[in-house]
Image (spheres, grey):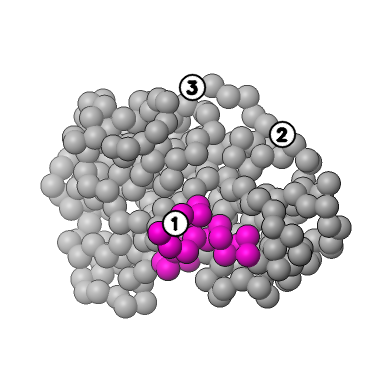
Amino acid sequence: MPRIKLTIAYQGTHYVGWQVQPNGVSIQARLMDAVEALLGERVPVEAAGRTDAGVHATGQVVCLSTSRELPLKAYWRGLNGLLPEDIAVVRAEQVPEAFDPRRWSLGKRYRYQVSNRPSRSPLLRATHWEVFAPLDVEALRQGATHLLGRHDFSSFRAADCQAAHAVREVRRVEVVGQRGGDVSITVEGTAFLKHMVRNLVGTLMEVGKGRRPPGWVAEVLAARERKRAGPTAPAHGLLLEEVLYGEGPPPRSPGGMADDDTE
């Protein structure tokens, strides 16, 4: 039975998130409707991870299995003809039947986008967090260095996070941009806790605004208490940029477990 891997992009503004929910329209529901129209059958669609309401993606990975034999371009062009304009398939591949988009992942890369312009920007309001206070970008970079490595990230998990433990490994935190313009914070790691990236960004903004020194980030991390960290950054600034894979399922260790929490 063919196993199809789809890389999809979406603007999450008008959705309740990736996962099907009773309180509104989800990206998963829209994709499943399009797949059903294409294949003539309702099939499950599995994702590498869930994204919250308002969160966007350029590299979400989903998988489906079907008895239908179709050329790969049918999943690309065909589905794009059936999907709404704010969801698109950007790549389709056939993968081994055992492929699991979540458990085979080596990690994810997120990018958080901030507009630091002195006045609001109507064209960016759905994709950037507008922070009007001038940001010290170098201080942001210094604060971000304390987040690298394997740590207990309890200070940066949501109160209702269901993960069994808070040990995660962050491989990259990169701050790009300038005061008064656009600033992006790229975070790459093996796995993430619920709201972890948004809580990291909210904490770094306290440093960028000059309210806290860069070394305070290390103190927050060591405290393992959510109340010590900064606020949760808004969902609409977050972008799932890429899900990373190797040749097969990776070995797992504490901090490297595939997680299923929303971001």
Q: As drawn, is 263 to the left or to the right of 141?
A: right
Residue annotated with mark 2: 248
Q: Residue at x 46, y 54 (%)?
A: 21
Q: Where does label 1 land, which residue?
A: 22
Left or right relative to 98: residue 7: left
What's the CA distance linking mark 2 and mark 3?
A: 19 Å
The residue labelled by disc 3 is 254
Which contiguous range is marked in magenta?
A: 11-33
Q: Does 194 sit left or right of 62 as displayed?
A: left
The image quarter containing residue 182 is bottom left
Amino acid, disc 3: Pro
Location of residue 176 (image quadrant): bottom left
Q: Secondary structure at mark 1?
A: loop
- Height in image: 122 above or below 74? below
Query: What amino acid is found at the position of numbered circle 2 in the picture?
Result: Gly
Residue 82's place in the image compared with 96, above or below, is below
